[in-house]
Image (cartoon, rainbow, N blue to C red):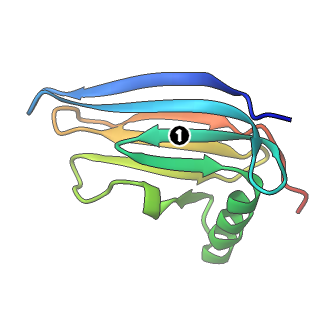
Amino acid sequence: MANHKSKVDEWEVKDLEDNSTIRVYVEHNSEMGNKEVPGLQVTSMGHITNYEPLHVERWVYAAKKAGQKEFLIADTSWTYYEDTYIKNLLVIGETLKARVEVKVRSSDKPVIKEYELPFNLNN
């Protein structure tokens, strides 16, 4: 079966400091990973974060081991500055969620959006 992609959300945060814009695109994929199950893909600033079962299982394990309810996916986040960043996180709870946080210099607070993952883990 072919993978079908559909847009879930598309948004941007403009920084008035330098007139730059950070764009975020979230899409649902009907088949992701080795298990070929539905998943989410988040794209921003040239980075792609795939929320599919094999990745998510490892992230949940790492978060539990560290005693965290939120796991920062550091390799696809951009966190070089405290006043400008994009963070991709996995929120662990009754339902698993992808969280995207975007902060720009001209804004006091980050823009935060969460997306429920279209699968469950059997752990």
Number of numbered discs overlaid on the protein picture: 1
The answer to whether 24 is drawn above or below residue 81 in the figure is above
> How dense is the environment of label 1, judged by Cα within 10 Å: few (below 14), some, or many (20 and up)?
many
Disc 1 on helix, strand or loop? Answer: strand
Residue at left 53%, top 51%? 89
Quarter of the image for the C terminus: give it.
bottom right
Displayed quadrant of residue 31:
top right
Residue 88 placement, left or right of 67: left
Q: In this figure, which residue is indicated by the disc labeled 1? A: 42
Displayed quadrant of residue 97:
top right
The answer to whether 92 is drawn above or below residue 58 in the figure is above
Residue at left 65%, top 39%? 40
Q: Mark 1 is on which residue type?
A: Val
Displayed quadrant of residue 9:
top right
Taking depth in this image into account, of 78 and 27 the one nearest to the observer is: 27
Quarter of the image for the N terminus: give it.
top right
Residue at left 25%, top 60%? 80
Q: Position of residue 49 (x, y in %)?
A: 54, 49
